[in-house]
């Protein structure tokens, strides 16, 4: 009978540590972000058409994956890099386009930068601070359904992949939206 109280105390301590109570210090919390997103960028309405007619497109869509995902930070990038040996053989959703955000109080603050071949495999799109260098400032928010959306300020470049047909535009009114997949 000397061992019974110790066993009961040990069992009670283990049961308390395995509580399903979400406020328990040992309860795991899932990061507030998805593992992959469909990300859409829309060039500002102030951007000129650039004379490209129907070849010009204002909306560019990518399938992207989370690289870093915590309660306070998120980094989303394209799943593969350019084919450096033969860029013409680069696959859709390839490049170095990346979104980096800190998250607090439902608000996102960070940067978007890089260049990539869109999901359609036809258009390439880049985001920079200016002069095709650096990263653009971006802000946003998280909606109740997990979608992220916001604006970015900087230079966007867009073209039909591997051609000179396209343009660039520096503006504060570019928008982005990341929908969980």
Image (tube, helix red, strand yellow):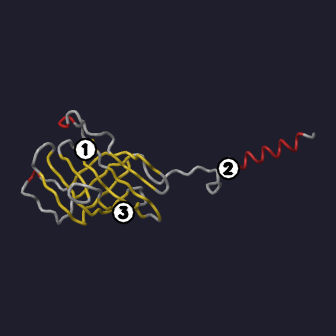
Instruction: List the residue tagged with mark 3.
Output: 140
Instruction: List the residue tagged with mark 1.
Output: 119
Q: Position of residue 1 (x, y in %)?
A: 93, 39
Mark 3 residue crowding within 10 angstroms, few (<14) / some (14–19) / many (20+): many
Q: Residue at x 16, y 57 (%)?
A: 168
Q: Position of residue 84 (x, y in %)?
A: 24, 36
Of the image marks 2 and 1, the number of the one nearer the N terminus: 2
Distance Cα–Cα, label 2 vs label 1: 44 Å
Q: Secondary structure at mark 2?
A: loop
Q: Nearer the viewer, mark 2 or mark 1?
A: 1
Instruction: List the residue tagged with mark 2.
Output: 19
* Quadrant in which residue 108 is drawn: bottom left
Horizontal side of residue 42 vs 22, given as left or right: left
**Vertical arrangement, residue 15 with respect to residue 90, above or below:** below
Q: Position of residue 3 (x, y in %)?
A: 89, 39
Q: Residue at x 17, y 52 (%)?
A: 158
Q: Position of residue 43 (x, y in %)?
A: 21, 59
Q: Secondary structure at mark 1?
A: loop
Distance Cα–Cα, label 1 vs label 3: 23 Å
């Amino acid at each position: 009978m000397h061992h019974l109280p110790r066993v009961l105390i040990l069992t009670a301590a283990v049961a308390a540590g395995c509580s399903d109570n979400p406020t328990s210090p040992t309860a795991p919390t899932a990061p507030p972000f998805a593992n992959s997103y469909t990300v859409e960028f829309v060039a500002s309405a102030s951007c000129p058409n650039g004379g490209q007619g129907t070849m010009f497109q204002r909306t560019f869509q990518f399938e992207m994956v989370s690289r870093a995902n915590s309660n306070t930070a998120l980094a989303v990038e394209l799943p593969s890099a350019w084919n450096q040996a033969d860029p013409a053989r680069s696959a859709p959703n390839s490049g170095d386009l990346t979104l980096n955000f800190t998250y607090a109080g439902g608000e996102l603050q960070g940067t978007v930068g890089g260049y990539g071949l869109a999901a359609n495999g036809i258009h390439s799109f880049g985001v920079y601070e200016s002069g095709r260098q650096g990263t653009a400032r971006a802000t946003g928010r998280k909606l109740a359904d997990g979608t992220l959306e916001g604006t970015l300020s900087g230079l966007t470049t867009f073209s039909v992949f591997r051609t000179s047909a396209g343009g660039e535009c520096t503006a504060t009114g570019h928008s982005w939206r990341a929908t969980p997949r």
